[in-house]
Structures are given as C-alpha cells and as structure tokens.
C-alpha cells in the first residue's frame, strides 16, 4: 500500500427524498456519495464534519451522520433488517466493519444575536484502519422528536488516496465485509 499524494475533498448535501435506502418509517436513511470503481486504489478517511452555513442560519443542516463502505447497488438491495443494523438501530455501530466513522451533532448554543449560529463540528470518530475501496455512503437519522435531526444533512469529508495491489484490495474488501457473514441482526 502506497500513498499517491492525492487528496480528495467531498462536500455536499444529502436528502431523505433522494436517499437510496430509507427505513420504512422514514426515520433514517443511507445515501451513496462516492463511487470509484478503479482497481488498485483505496481511500483513507482523514477528516469528516458537518458543513455549516454561516450566512443563513435557517439553512444550517447540522444533523450528525455515519460514514459507510456501502455501494449504491448494495443500498438499493438492502432490506429493512439490514438497514436497521447498519444504521445502529439493532446493532452497535462500533462493531460494524462497514461503518468507517461517525460525525456527531455540532455543539449547539442559544444564539445571543441574530448572526450567532451553532458551533462548528467538534465531535467525530474515524476508524484508523478503515479504508474505502470503491464506495462511500452517508447514513443519518432524518426524523426525531428531539428536533436534532434533519431530512437534509450537509457534509465535508477529506480522503487520502492510496495505490493498493490486487491482494491488498481483496483483503480490504474482505475486512469491510467480514462481520456481515455472522448476520446483521442481534437477538
């Protein structure tokens, strides 16, 4: 595995109404944000955050999200039990190899003046050994009684590109999927 020196920066917005997987009750969803089907390359996530909108507080989509190594095809074929497990409803995200990291909600404070918006993102966890080989997806809770979630989430993600041999690529894919073989649902 050798770093290429190329960095990839992703930013954008994902929406419940265009997500590739949505729980039946529309409380959570998953959306693919990166597809790179080139063989021999992998990415390491080095930073992830919500992307604040400081010019219009009404458009500050500050919901937290998880990063996953699911492809668009996998999301479109995912059933409700698999989705509940992947989104942390029925399983711990910490035990899922397909979960690369979690970006928590930004610290929220009461605005003292009209221009004062929530603090920038300061809580996240990225697994140090997780590599993305072909796809990167975002999962988030889109509906909640607490009001701290959003059907729209803005994100910013930094990735480092690596060249990998065929054997390394296979091992990375197997590692990401290794815990799926035991089943996705905990009793």
Image (spheres, rainbow, N blue to C red):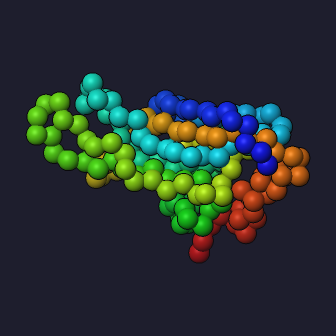
When the figure is inspected, residue 177 is found, relative to residue 91, above or below; the finding is: above
Q: Residue at x 77, y 45 (%)?
A: 2
Q: Going by the picture, which residue comes out furthest to the top?
A: 55
Q: Position of residue 147 (x, y in %)?
A: 28, 47
Residue 134 showing in the rendered view: no
When the figure is inspected, residue 108 is found, relative to residue 93, above or below; the finding is: above
Q: Residue at x 83, y 52 (%)?
A: 168
> Camera-side residue: 9 or 95?
9
Examine the image and state in which quarter residue 174 appears: bottom right
When the figure is inspected, residue 92 is found, relative to residue 115, above or below; the finding is: below
Q: Residue at x 18, y 35 (%)?
A: 116
> Camera-side residue: 45 or 95?
45
Examine the image and state in which quarter residue 162 appears: top right
Residue 124 showing in the rendered view: yes
Quarter of the image with the C terminus is bottom right
Q: Going by the picture, which residue comes out furthest to the right?
A: 166
Q: Residue at x 75, y 63 (%)?
A: 178
In the picture, measured across the screen, residue 89 lies left or right of residue 21, that is left
In the picture, measured across the screen, residue 133 lies left or right of residue 52, that is right
Q: Where is residue 78 in the image (x, y as percent from the top left)?
A: 66, 48
């Amino acid at each position: 595995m050798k770093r290429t020196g190329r960095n990839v920066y992703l930013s954008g917005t994902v929406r419940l109404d265009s997500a590739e997987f949505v729980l039946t009750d529309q409380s959570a969803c998953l959306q693919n944000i990166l597809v790179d089907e080139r063989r021999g390359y992998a990415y390491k996530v080095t930073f992830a955050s919500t992307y604040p909108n400081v010019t219009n507080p009404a458009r500050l989509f500050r919901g937290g999200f998880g990063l996953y190594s699911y492809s668009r095809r996998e999301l479109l074929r995912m059933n409700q039990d698999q989705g509940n497990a992947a989104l942390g409803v029925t399983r711990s995200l910490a035990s899922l190899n397909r979960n690369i990291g979690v970006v928590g909600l930004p610290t929220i404070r009461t605005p003292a003046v009209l221009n004062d918006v929530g603090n920038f993102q300061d809580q996240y966890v990225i697994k140090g050994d997780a590599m993305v080989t072909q796809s990167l997806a975002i999962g988030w809770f889109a509906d909640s009684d607490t009001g701290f979630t959003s059907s729209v989430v803005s994100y910013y993600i930094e990735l480092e590109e690596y060249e990998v041999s065929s054997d390394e690529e296979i091992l990375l894919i197997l590692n990401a999927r290794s815990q799926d073989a035991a089943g996705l649902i905990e009793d």
